[in-house]
Image (spheres, rainbow, N blue to C red):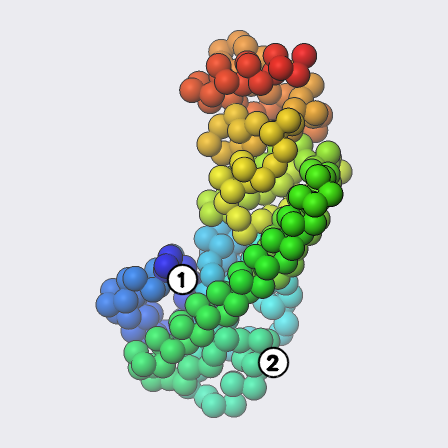
Amino acid sequence: MNPINAIIISGEKETLQILKKFEEENAMIIEILGEADGISTGTLLIKSKKPDLIFLDIVLEDQAFFEMLEQLEFSIPKLVFLSAHKECAMMAFKHNAIDFLLKPLDFNAIILAIYKVIKRREMERSYQNHKINSINILNSASQSNDYVAVAFLEKIELIPTADIIFCKADGKHTVFVLLNGTKVMSSRNLGEYSTILDHNYFFRIHHSYIINLRHIVKISKKDGYFCEFSNGAILPVAKRRQEDFNKFIKLKE
């Protein structure tokens, strides 16, 4: 099991010390990627680190923070609220928090909250995989490769494969860059899509990219191999993949 990636938003030194101490003793289940002392720095940290979990120990005066979470281009992190005031629990569960921990914090309460996050994540992935498998079975039955199911923890989108210009690795996620200029994030890694996408049109040119042959407008062999696409993007072909890529291109000519 991969550990839960978390960040802490708290202005209290004691909260940070307790959570960091907990991480040291429970590295198998949690990794703290960073901490922030306020909402503005916390927002930047969320967007750069893309955590699974946020420990939130800040009194919020408005809804802007939660609106920002809803607009993220990656999976919305789970929330665990921390407070010395019981009345803050109402706000926590109003915003679908996984848990509310009353300060002073103790390790038993923290570990229960983390296991709730793990359980929720497992339930979401199980549901997601069930839906994707159903879609894949339907595609196999119809012998159709016209669509690919792109799974995010909160939703599943069916994307026409002809609209995919390329797919890009983004850590443990994959970003689909589409013909209309939009980008769609998937919670699956790029390697999984290497086996799913139609091998007649899609080729992995690099450990970070799978490209759609139908959208290549030019291949440059000056100072290395580069593919230029209909949206203006230029991507490198890894040296060790150049020979296989040449064979792939020639088969299509």
Q: Position of residue 101 (x, y in %)?
A: 42, 82
> On the image, which quarter does residue 216 sit in?
top right
Q: Earlier in the sequence, mark 2 or mark 1?
A: 1
**Residue under pointer 1:** 4
Identity of the residue drawn at 46% across and 32% down = 207
- Note whether 236 is above or below 89 in the view shown: above
Tell me if I can see residue 232 in this picture: no
Choose between 253 and 115: the one closer to the eye: 253
Tell me if I can see residue 197 in this picture: yes
Amino acid of disc 1:
Ile
Q: Is residue 64 left or right of residue 142?
A: left
What secondary structure is found at the residue carrying circle 2? Answer: helix
Choose between 101 and 115: the one closer to the eye: 115
Which residue reaches farthest top? 222
Choose between 149 and 39: the one closer to the eye: 149
**Residue under pointer 2:** 94
Report the quarter where the C terminus lies: top right
What secondary structure is found at the residue carrying circle 1? Answer: strand
